[in-house]
Amino acid sequence: MDAKDILGLPKNSLPLEKKSRPQKDSQRKPDGISREITWQWLPFTNSARKDSLQLYHWVRVVNGVPPTGDYSFAKYNKSVDVFKYTDEEYEKYLTDPMWTKEETDQLFDLCQQFDLRFVVIADRFPSSRTVEELKDRYYSVARAILIARAPSPGDVSGHPLVKEPYNVAQETDRKRALSMVLSQTKHQERKDAEVLAEAKRITESRMVARGEEPELPVPSNAGPESAERAITPGDTVSPSSNVQLPSATIAPSTVTADNASILASLRMLRVYLRTYALDQMVQAASSSAGLRTIKRVEQTLQELGVNLKPRVPTKAVCAEHLELRREILTLLNLQKQCSGQASSAL
């Protein structure tokens, strides 16, 4: 007994017929369209090099015609235009008691060689100079040359080197503060969070005990003019008006208390993004309004062509942005109050 007897299959089964596959029509390429592609080991030169060195690489050749033109990666060779000065300009505009002419010449040669990569320049510089000192010397010399060669100072007043000069003290403090933040352990981060929470609680309790109204929620580096505008939330409404102002307009103590605590917490951080501070202020200023009112404020900003978040969040821009949001919120509350009174009068 075999497997066929068990399965009940006939022993003399007919052989299976193989299905014939349909033959594909041979597609002949039209005349003039056929291409012959090969790879060849050919020489090339790079226009980014100054020594005319000839190297070899594999090149895709179509129909026996090698590609022409410059080396494809030569376009990525970008260089920085480093300022040059003469001996007369150095003696007249660029002398510095902390720097000799030889050191300045070495600095500018390295800047030209390494494309202003100051970390590499500091490593290759012969004397012991920090990255900040090298940057300060280079940008101060470049700014002096730019001003000296201009017909008048007003012609170069908009140049980045003149408009925003390099501040070596600020850069040093920034790196030191950033190093302190990045070197914190998890335990120190938890401890700082506990201190900030306790400071916020103490600030709120003191404000409630004194019953004083804090300043308007503006960034911690906002000017005194913005703070002066902050403490007059109802300056656009006549005091003799019989219209009853909404609570968000005449009693902003809760909102300003939250913002004062936020400001205190941010000042203790020492290093924080101004956009983060602005987001915190906007949330605190809109905490007393409903979701629909907040959407109406954002819609009004879009209608006025104002971005919901400033593209350049300087202290003046952030202060004006918060002031505009406050005025729009006051206007919406007044409109709501007036419409309510008009409907009740009918």
Image (cartoon, grey):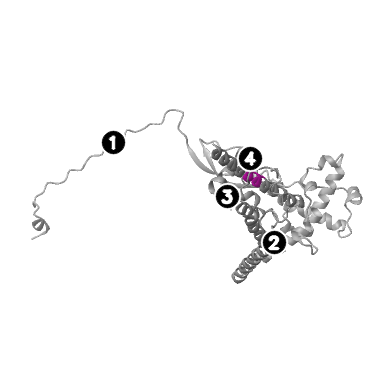
Amino acid at dot 3? Ala
N-terminal-most mark, 4 or 2: 4
Query: Do labels 2 and 3 touch, CB within 8 Å?
Result: no
Amino acid at dot 4? Asp
N-terminal-most mark, 2 or 3: 2
Amino acid at dot 2? Arg
Residue visible at 85% across and 48% down?
144
Marks 3 and 4 sit apart, C-alpha to C-alpha, by 63 Å
**Place of residue 213 in the rendered image (x, y in percent of width and height, measured from the top left):** 69, 57
**Place of residue 262 in the rendered image (x, y in percent of width and height, measured from the top left):** 65, 59
Q: Which mark, by number, is residue 267?
A: 2
Query: Do labels 2 and 1 touch, CB within 8 Å?
Result: no
Q: Which residue is mark 4?
A: 70
Q: Secondary structure at mark 4?
A: loop
Q: Nearer the viewer, residue 75 or 222?
A: 222
N-terminal-most mark, 2 or 1: 1
Amino acid at dot 1? Gln
Q: Nearer the viewer, mark 2 or mark 3?
A: 3
Q: Secondary structure at mark 1?
A: loop
Q: Which residues are magenta?
A: 324-331
**Place of residue 150 in the rendered image (x, y in percent of width and height, measured from the top left):** 85, 41
Q: Nearer the viewer, residue 233 or 276?
A: 233
Q: Nearer the viewer, mark 2 or mark 1?
A: 2
Marks 2 and 1 sit apart, C-alpha to C-alpha, by 81 Å
Q: Which residue is mark 3?
A: 289
Q: Which residue is mark 1?
A: 23
Q: Is residue 29 magenta?
A: no
